[in-house]
Amino acid sequence: MIQIAVMGYGTVGSGVVEVIEKNKEMVNKKSAQELNVKYILDLREFPGDPYEDKVIHDVNRIMEDDEVTVVCETMGGLKPAYEFTKMALTRGKSVCTSNKELVAAYGPELLELAREHSCNYLFEASVGGGIPIIRPLNYSLTAEKIEAVTGILNGTTNYILSKMETEGADFDSVLRKAQEKGYAERNPEADVEGYDACRKIAILSSLMLGKHVDYRKIYTEGITKITGDDFVYAKAMGKTIKLLALSKETPQGAIAMVSPFLIDLTNPLHMVNGVFNAVCVRGNMLGDSMYYGRGAGKLPTASAVVSDVVDCARHQGKTVMCFWDREEAVLADPGQVERAFFVRAKADGREQVSRAFPGGSFVEAGRTRDCGYLTPVMKEKDFAERYAALGDAALGRIRVEG
Ligand code: HSE
């Protein structure tokens, strides 16, 4: 029997207990033994909860119990999750987590600790919620040199952009409605500014490169400057706008970034709408593959945590290889990357815009208030300088993917 402790009985933690209970027969069969939740660690009491007798408040009860061999860390945040995770791993207890902040910040150190103590640190639920993406990168695509990972990794922002597109509404009003319905957090900063997607692409980039990608060095831009007007132009161009998190090898070196992009309707990511997430992975032998599903939510995320628990049950006393070294990956200067840009400017700024970016073309969307212009492919740095020189005439700019 595998005795499990769940640390953090919030949305995901309670989902973990529910998945293990609901799918008991199946997960036990797949683990080749019985899984049992022995402890649930939380600061709160849960009177009336069917598992209230398992709730404890002292982490040492878990750490000192040799029967517990797998710990699910569903607390989120760095403190005290970092300390608790280290405590468990140094005692040879495997840890399965949904905590992207912790994985992005301390992944290589915790993986090394797991190796030293012949246990596992698994984090399928940390990126893309219930979508299997860590395991494909780590196990299934081992014959590939991964050339690019491009994803819609944040459900909140994808929901907002989808609504802006279909309802022609502005960012603020869609965000307000999303908050009222509980789709967006009261403090939406981590989602709308791209910080959440940044942690997730840092994890995927590290797995792609086998070296540590420091999330603090990833260029990150959120969706707060995207307007309903931008979607009018996007439609006129046969494109849509998505917050992409991407990591790819370029002639200038590896780059990683989070930013809104205009993408063609032929790009498979264009049909990823609402709270759904998707990740496209390009391997040098396989070509493109895509992973799609629910990137958040209680049961989808818990399902990914439990899949890691099953993996631990199958690999007791053995560490599953994960190629993510402590050595830091050197990312190329994003300023040197070349791409086209869409510029929206005041109507009387037409001449200024075409002079600033010769060789581009205006986007005709039947508007008189403003104008839209597609630049030729150029270096980010050159674009930024010329765009800044437009001064008050400029109303916004969006990167163009592909
Ligand atoms: N806030 C995240 C999202 C939850 O909107 O995708 C999952 O990490």
Image (cartoon, helix red, strand yellow):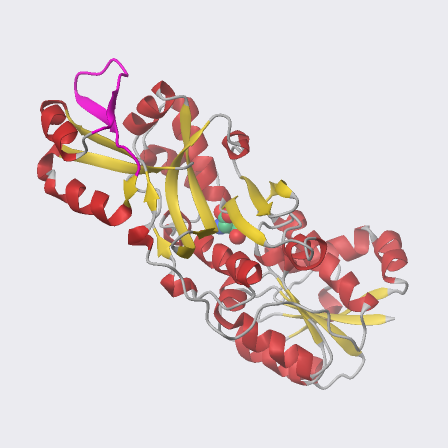
Residue nearer the viewer, 72 or 329: 329
Pick the front one: 94 or 184: 94
Residue at far front of view: 251
Q: Residue at x 34, y 49 (%)?
A: 337
Tell me residue 65's x, y (percent).
76, 83
Quadrant of the snapshot with the C terminus: top left
Compared to residue 239, the image places residue 305 above or below, namely: below
Is residue 371 within the magenta segment? yes
Is 98 rendered above or below residue 89? above
> In this orientation, does residue 183 appear?
no
Is 196 inside the magenta-drawn segment?
A: no
> In the figure, residue 58 lies in which quadrant?
bottom right
Front residue of 222 and 322: 322
Quadrant containing the N terminus in the rendered view? bottom right
The magenta-colored residue range is: 359-377
State the count of labels: 0
Judged left or right of residue 320, residue 127 is left
Residue at 70% from the left image edge and 69% from the top image edge: 321
Q: Where is residue 285 shown, x and y percent of the image?
A: 65, 46
Would residue 134 be visible to someone looking at this image? yes
Residue 95 rendering spot, x and y as whole percentages: 67, 71
Residue drawn 51% across the image and 58% down it: 205
Left or right side of 178 for 149: right
How far from the left and from the top, in percent, is residue 42?
A: 61, 70
- Residue 208 or 80: which is nearer the viewer? 208
